[in-house]
Amino acid sequence: MMFKRLFALLPRWGSSRPSFDASGTTHQTELLEGQGHGHNVFTRRALLVMAAQGSILGLLGNRLYNLQLLEGDALKEKARRNRTSKRYLAPPRGLIVDRAGVTVAGNRVNWRAVITIEDLGSLDAALAKLSAIVPLDDHDRARIARDRKRMRRFVPLVLKEFLTWDDMAAISLNAPSLPGVLVDVGTTREYPFDELMAHIVGYVAPPNEKDVQKEPMLALPGMRVGRAGIEQTQEVVLHGKPGYVSSEVNAVGRVISELERVDGVAGSTLGLTLDSVLQKQVRDRIGGRVASAVVMDCRNGEIMAMVSTPSFQPGLFDSGVSHAQWQAWMSDPRAPLTDKVVSGLYPPGSTFKPAVALAALSTGKVSPKDRFHCPGYYDVGGVRFHCWNRHGHGMVNMRAGLKFSCDCYFYQVARRCGMDAIEQASNAMGMGVKLPIELPHVHAGVIPTPAWRKRHGGHWNTGDTVNAGIGQGYVQVSPLGLATYTAALASGNLVQPHLVRSIEGRLVPPAQPKKLPFTEEQLSVVRGGMYAVVNEPYGSGSRARLDMPGIQLAGKTGSAQVRHVSRALRESGHFNSMKLPWEYRPHALFICYAPYKNPRYAVAVIVEHGNAGGKEAAPLARDIMADTLRRDPARRGQKTEGFVAQAGPVNG
């Protein structure tokens, strides 16, 4: 009905008014023609308008469909992100404590200025504004430029660390002009014992590009990576899992409120076998010497103390070591950055003689009663090898050879049993093998053999065997290897030295000891000789004697040459190694265990260029053992004062 009315009106719309002649008659033909023309014009216009309207409505509908259905979730998330800002939080690093629970590596608060590039328009503009308020030095700018390239945009970028209260007040006061800049609180590593534990605990430093590529979350502000010691080897246990904080922000990125915070999971607390009190006592005993010392539990391989001097300040690596400091360390001939206990290699000198004795006994080529003559020298192929006593020791058996540290005796014993047997005996007791302790850069040392020499392009001769028989020549051991070897001599078992005692309060069981390939009778002969070294008249280590009722110490001296001394000079009678420059003097060594009848602790000491083991290293080892026995829980409360060195000749 509506369409009929519409069509009835169309002629009036599509034509001019009808004309009349004088008689009033309408020109019907013209009207009809006009009516048809107007109808066509209307139809075209209406269709065009309707098509345009339909297209617009279709586009709007399609757009609404896309916005609400297809892109709705994404746009909703984008709107939420425009309103909120999410920052990831570095977790606190796990604590490292000694066997009594005393913290040796902890955390302290670190305030820092951070910014999230993802929420920012121009980082350069933000840096310019911040530097006008809190100055940024060249080190800060270089670090920011480096981190900017490698970090993901959602990870907060550290602009300035270790802010003072004045810095934080200035940033807060100028917050409106610093969009996206936040003052964040985190932690930084702290080492209460400083240099005392540096080589063992190690240190942390900011992650490098390689670290971040492996684990992107390491780029978080405050994340640190272990670079030495326990910090490095136990990184997975210590670094924890990151958290995050979600905040509501305004249009310029300023935080309005905190919406959600999920704290990171702190790293696990690591308990060490070390006794921090004993560690300090050992360090104090060493004093200004360039030395290393190890105290080990003979029964299970726990390291009670481990000192390498000189040392360094581990906390410097957290904030960055200056070029001047690094150059000072590198140019120091005493090598303060090197952990001499595990990385230092030294000729063991006469401390190696018990291993040679056991090798000879185990092959059956030498018995404890066999006697060798010592006139003060031993000739092999036109080469003369001297004894430390140029007057000689006369006829010597195994016990006397150990007691007096007779070089000529062990020249002949080594030649008779051969280097292959000596290597096997040494390896069985922890020398010349890499010990699986929880530290990096552990060196195995060298127990040379003809096959080893051939692999290195050389020829082995009898003189090499003779020289190795007194721990010289190509023989190289670490202080840790010496301590493990001493514990094996004392207990009859090879124990695995270790530093990690517990993780999160749960004890870590030590590896099972391995039985040595020697009989009890063979071990008793060598132990008896080591007892005589310290406790019988004229023993080479009499200065190590303990003045403690019911407790004796068994040990072995050693003096290792670092420079060849000519035959003429030795035979002149005027040679005195103490007159040589410090760096040319022999190393002084001493190994021992106590109590003799029921061994509990083993001690190994090396004093670099200390000259004579009996004079320099033996008294030091005695004092360390005394301190260790005083710390023994089984003996606390008993009177153990009065440790006095006994007089005797200095040699070996």
Image (cartoon, grey):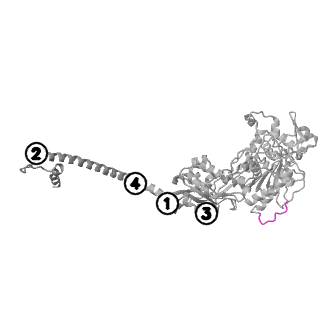
Cβ–Cβ under 8 Å for marks 1 and 2: no
Q: Main secondary structure of the magenta part?
A: loop
Horizontal and vertical percent for residue 626? 80, 59
Query: Could you say whether the residue bearing mark 2 is in a helix, strand or loop?
Result: helix
How far apart marks 3 and 4 lie (CA) works out to 42 Å
Horizontal and vertical percent for residue 232? 65, 51
How far apart marks 2 and 4 lie (CA) works out to 63 Å
Query: Could you say whether the residue bearing mark 4 is in a helix, strand or loop?
Result: helix
Q: 537 or 116, which is in the foreground?
A: 116
Horizontal and vertical percent for residue 339? 73, 49
Q: Earlier in the sequence, mark 1 or mark 3?
A: 3
Q: Disc 3 marks which residue?
A: 169
Answer yes or no: is residue 593 visible.
yes
* Quarter of the view holding residue 93: bottom right
Q: Mark 2 or 4, which is nearer the eye? A: 2
* Magenta run includes residue 177: no
Q: Earlier in the sequence, mark 2 or mark 3?
A: 2
Q: Disc 2 marks which residue?
A: 29
Q: Residue 72, which numbered label? A: 4
Magenta stretch in the rendered image: 635-643
Q: Residue 250, which numbered label? A: 1
Query: Could you say whether the residue bearing mark 3 is in a helix, strand or loop?
Result: helix
Kind of residue sitting beneath label 3: Ala
How far apart marks 1 and 2 lie (CA) works out to 75 Å
Kind of residue sitting beneath label 1: Asn
